[in-house]
Image (cartoon, rainbow, N blue to C red):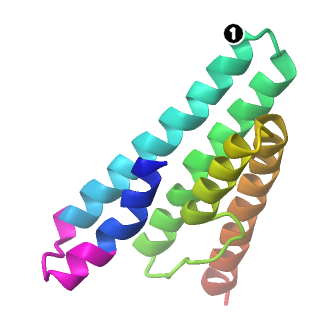
């Protein structure tokens, strides 16, 4: 929870103190990927240890979506397209996980993340397609 909070405010702090840099942005993105994947993989491992193969598989599907969402954004940016679309961006994923953990609905949370992360990927891919196939 603490890590998620600081991640949501670090960019604002950098901007307000005039310490924004290109390298800082890249480093922040890389660390975000590590933390996103570490959390979702840890959840999958937890389900594996409990013997729940279905929820372990669902969690691994969520891991794939969580990894691909920022990849689509990065590829879009490389093509000169701003790609800030999608129902489950990083802040929403963090909030969803926090709520799921706090109200003890992690199983449902992972199902929602597995579905909505791939919906977000499709939203971004279609957004990019609109720009590149004009």
Above-or-below relation of 28 to 37: below
Toward the front, the furthest residue is 103
Residue 28 spot, x, y in % from top left: 31, 57
Query: Which of the 4 quarters of the picture holds residue 94?
Result: bottom right
Query: Which of the 4 quarters of the picture holds residue 80?
Result: bottom left
Task: Write the residue at 27% across / 60% down.
Answer: 26
Residue 18 spot, x, y in % from top left: 13, 83
Magenta highlight range:
12-23
Residue 95 spot, x, y in % from top left: 62, 58
Left or right: residue 74 versus residue 16 is right
Above-or-below relation of 58 to 98: above
Figure quadrant of the C terminus:
bottom right
Task: Write the residue at 79% across / 33% down.
Answer: 58
Task: Write the residue at 79% across / 9% down.
Answer: 51
Left or right: residue 9 versus residue 96 is left
Determine which residue is flagged by label 1.
49
Nearest the viewer among 26 and 92 is 92
Please tell me whether mark 1 sits on a helix, a strand or a loop: helix
């Amino acid at each position: 929870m603490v890590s998620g909070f600081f991640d949501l405010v670090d960019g604002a702090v950098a901007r307000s103190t005039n310490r924004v840099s290109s390298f800082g942005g890249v480093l922040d993105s890389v660390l975000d990927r590590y933390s996103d994947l570490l959390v979702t993989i840890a959840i999958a491992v937890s389900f594996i240890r409990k013997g729940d193969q279905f929820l372990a598989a669902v969690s691994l599907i969520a891991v794939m979506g969580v990894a691909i969402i920022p990849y689509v954004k990065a590829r879009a940016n490389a093509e000169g397209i701003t790609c800030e679309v999608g129902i489950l961006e990083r802040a929403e994923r963090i909030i969803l996980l926090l709520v799921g953990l706090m109200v003890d609905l992690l199983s449902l949370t992972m199902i929602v993340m597995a579905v909505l992360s791939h919906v977000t990927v499709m939203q971004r891919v279609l957004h990019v397609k609109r720009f590149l196939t004009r």
